[in-house]
Image: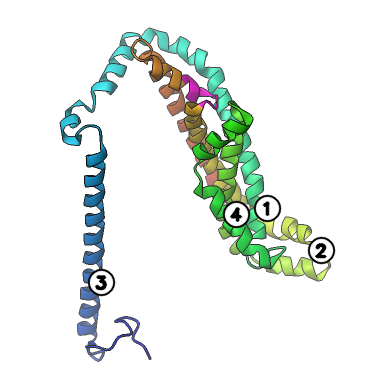
Amino acid sequence: MVDIAFGPTPGKRPDMTNPRQAYLEQVRRKRMYGGILLALFVGMLASGWILAEGRNAGGFWSGLPQIDDFAGEVISEAWANRANLPGLFVEFLPSLIETLNIAAIATLVGGLAAMVLALLSTRGLARWPRLIPLFRRAMDGFRAIPEIVIALVLIYVLGGGPVPAVIAIALHTSGALGKLFSEVAENADLKPVEGLTSVGATWGQRMWLGVLPQVAPNWLSYALLRFEINVRASAILGFVGEGGIGYDLKIAMQWGQGRYDKVVAIFLLLFLTIFVIDRVSDHFRNRMVKGH
């Protein structure tokens, strides 16, 4: 029998009749492997740093003292024009609502697609078991490509606006949520499914009546968490012309000095919105998963 604790190759083995000596030998080996991995990580980090420093337009250490210059200029100008902030909040509120709408629709569409992909790629539940690898690789592809890359491609097809943003975020959401939904569905009790099968229920009926009631709380919890992420993604996509408050932030930053109060107003709106969504969704997740 191979000693998997110390490898398959022959060599000196600890005296297993002495538990203390065997334990110390295992600890030494773990420390050695941990030290090797740490050394490799540090080496890769150092080489990456040297490469990035060589390709950078300026030196990191020479520019480090100026790291807070831009932030200080923005905050000081916004503070001087702080009386304008309430009016700016009202001005950018429609753009914020558009951003929330993009995130909500993308989460809904992506979540529905994720439900189908998850059930079709879960062992023991799949309608076509042989196609499980195909559906799993499709989810891998959807979540591997960043939303901004999909949006940039769709701009050439559909033009600028919220539609490419919705499609890009929905595709990424279907891949990310599909993976999470599938892991939850794998832990579902199959006895209700077997009972429904014995009375002649179709695959859709088995999923609707036997699986969804078990997984719905966790699925909704993941969907709410994904909605928070999609709000931020929707704001980021505004920088590439997809509408919403991100586009207003891009314009304000491009104008530069004299518009920094708008930049701060937009950042504050985004921060408050994400904070409220986080607290509300956290409350409902606890209610659904823990029952309180």
Mark 3 and mark 4: Cα distance apart in space: 38 Å
Query: Dot 2: what SS?
Result: loop
The residue drawn where x is 67% and y is 67% is 130
Number of marks drawn: 4
* Position in image of residue 20 (x %, y %): 21, 83
- Region of the chain picked out in magenta, as a range: 241-248
Q: In terms of sequence position, does the residue under pointer 1 or pointer 3 come before the other?
A: 3
- Of badges 3 and 2, nearer the viewer stands 3
Q: Residue 112: where, in percent of width, then height?
A: 66, 46
Distance from disc 3 to disc 2, alpha carbons, whole Å, reads: 53 Å
Under mark 3, the amino acid is Lys
Give amino acid for label 1: Val
Q: Is residue 245 left or right of residue 122?
A: left
Q: Which marked residue is nearer to the observer: mark 4 or mark 1?
A: 4
First of labels 3, 4 by sequence position: 3
Q: CA distance from mark 1 to mark 3?
A: 43 Å
Up/down of 181 relative to 102, above or below: below
Earlier in the chain: of badge 4 and badge 1, it is: 1
Residue that extends furthest to the right in the rendered view of this protein: 200
Look at mark 3 in the image and give the residue it sits on.
30
Q: Earlier in the sequence, mark 2 or mark 1?
A: 1
User: Could one spot residue 188 in this view of the protein?
Assistant: no
Residue 95 placement: quadrant: top right
What label does residue 138 carry, if any? 4
User: Given the image, on which type of amino acid does mark 2 rest?
Assistant: Ala
Residue bearing mark 2: 201
